[in-house]
Image (spheres, grey):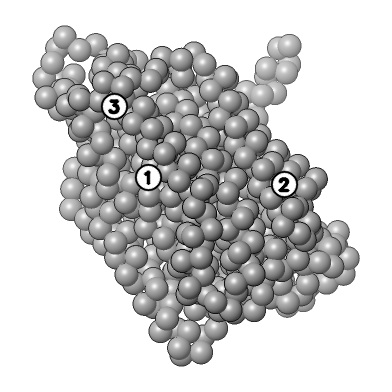
Amino acid sequence: MAENTTVENNPSVTPRKKKGMSFALSAIIVGFGVILVKFSGLIRDIVVSMKFSDVYRDSYILAFNIPDLFYNLLVGGAIYSTIAPYLSAHLAIGKEKEAIKTVSKFITAVCLVMLVCCTFGSLFSEPLYNFYGLFHKENAETIALAAQASKLLFPQIFFIMLAALCNGILISYRKFTITSFAPIFYNVFVIAAIFVFGGNSLKNLMWTTGGILVASVMYFLFQYILGFKQTRKFKLDFHLADREFGKLVLRAVPILISASVIQINTVVLNGFALKFDAGSVFGFRNASTIWQIPYSVFVVAITTVMTPELSGNYKSKEYEKASELVSHSMKSALFMTIPSAAFIAVLNLDVVKAIYQWSSSYTDQNAQTAATFLLGFCSAIVTATVIHVFNQAFYAIGKNWFPLIAGAIGLFVNPVVCSILISMGAGPLSLSLAYSFTNICQMIMLSIAYCRQKEIAPHGILKFLLKSAVCVAVMTGVVYLVDRFFPAHGGKITQLAIVAVKGGIALVVYFAMALIFRMEEATYWIAKIKRMFKKGSSKKAAS
């Protein structure tokens, strides 16, 4: 079968030479792009807090819930996690034309399905949200507003899907710069829509979501046009009776269900948040956004580069390289997410206020609500790192059912634990604690399953974790003492400066300890960043 053909057992195959940037440079560029994306995302949420009151903030967030659920149920993470490994693997063994033909059929199928479902969602948004409202009758106004606003968010997910298709294609061709910075373009248009149209009325809410629909169209066109050399190769192909296409669909199904589980849990947790004071849904969103900053910058950036690389290594039976790549990716990601989790745990309220409290519309109570959720999320920063690396590794090698099983565990454990904690009086903290506990269960399952494949299993993780634990313990102690003597009080500039200085101190202490322990993750990234600056300065001198 073509799926199992490798360079080794087919001498006629000429492997495609890898072009483009090194792993480290690619990861740095993707990471920088993610930082800018997250920064623009924070600005988006700040503008939401300024333009809407608590009820309309919650409605705005809930308006995305069911459209996003549709998206994840139908295509979601299956697009990138199916297309990128499949296309990358075939590029690695010189079978580009065959892969383009199969991926074109896949694109055609998902476009047809999404077109039908987006139309259905827009027409029947009110009955869908009315069903959701049966479980939250005390929030009827919030849910009714969300139902109306979602009418324009269903077509929006069709263009988000098209953008994701472009993303998967361009990553396979190692065009990381375009895919890293395209979401910034999208966020800028979304921020403009919220700023211009936002307000406490249904009309304002509808105009805002209409602006977001336009932003999604621009997001797709941005990637399609800039990556036209690659994207133009893929055409609609309605001849779907094809064996390779069927195999690709079967590969996508477990990824699809896994992505759906994540969104179902989000809908469930937002439902639980409605049980608390007005503004809790938005506070939960704020906390989720903050903990996902280090997760996205240091984990998603690295695995975005790792996935196509690992797929090529595995397809070519270069198992030692595959093992080294997963080990390096895991340790590099954890090296930064572990101290990030500790820092946020110590300064959760200060971090929330520094990021979101730019006007009186975001009250101290709003900040405290978000900080409470954030505290429970801290351990998830670390556990989600392990989960995501292993999930992407499984997708890269084509064993997609393990992430699905782990997701199914989460679908059951998350609401059960959340209900138990609420009944015990844990309050809003129940939501994020339940999420973190669920992540621990999933992490254990995925770790055991992946490490059973000894030839591609990561190595040296335990030794790395012991060293990181000592480093982060020292860092946490120093940050705690500094915070006791220098609390983040005063005006906004002073508040930001104090939090930034504490972050700088934490970074210096952690890296200093890591260098004392001779952790190669510290020396590796320092060397790479120095090399980037030297290259940049030498180019300027030459010009």
The residue depicted at 60 percent of the width and 37 percent of the height is: 216
**Which residue bears the numbered disc 2?**
207
Which of the 4 image quadrants contains residue 2?
Answer: top left
Mark 2 or 3, closer to the camera: 2
Sequence-wise, the earlier of marks 2 and 3 is 3
Give, as a three-letter code, the residue at label 2: Trp
- Above or below, 208 against 345 in this view is above
Which of the 4 image quadrants contains residue 437?
Answer: bottom left
Give, as a three-letter code, the residue at label 1: Leu
The residue depicted at 13 percent of the width and 16 percent of the height is: 10
- Above or below, 222 against 196 in this view is above
Q: Farthest residue in the bottom direction?
A: 424
**Which residue bears the numbered disc 3?**
89
**Which residue bears the numbered disc 1?**
74
The residue depicted at 63 percent of the width and 67 percent of the height is: 142
The residues tagged by marks 3 and 1 sit, at their Cα atoms, a distance apart of 24 Å
The residues tagged by marks 1 and 2 sit, at their Cα atoms, a distance apart of 27 Å
Image spot of residue 378 (x, y percent) = 52, 67
Say if mark 1 contacts mark 2, CB within 8 Å: no
Q: Quadrant of the N terminus?
A: top left
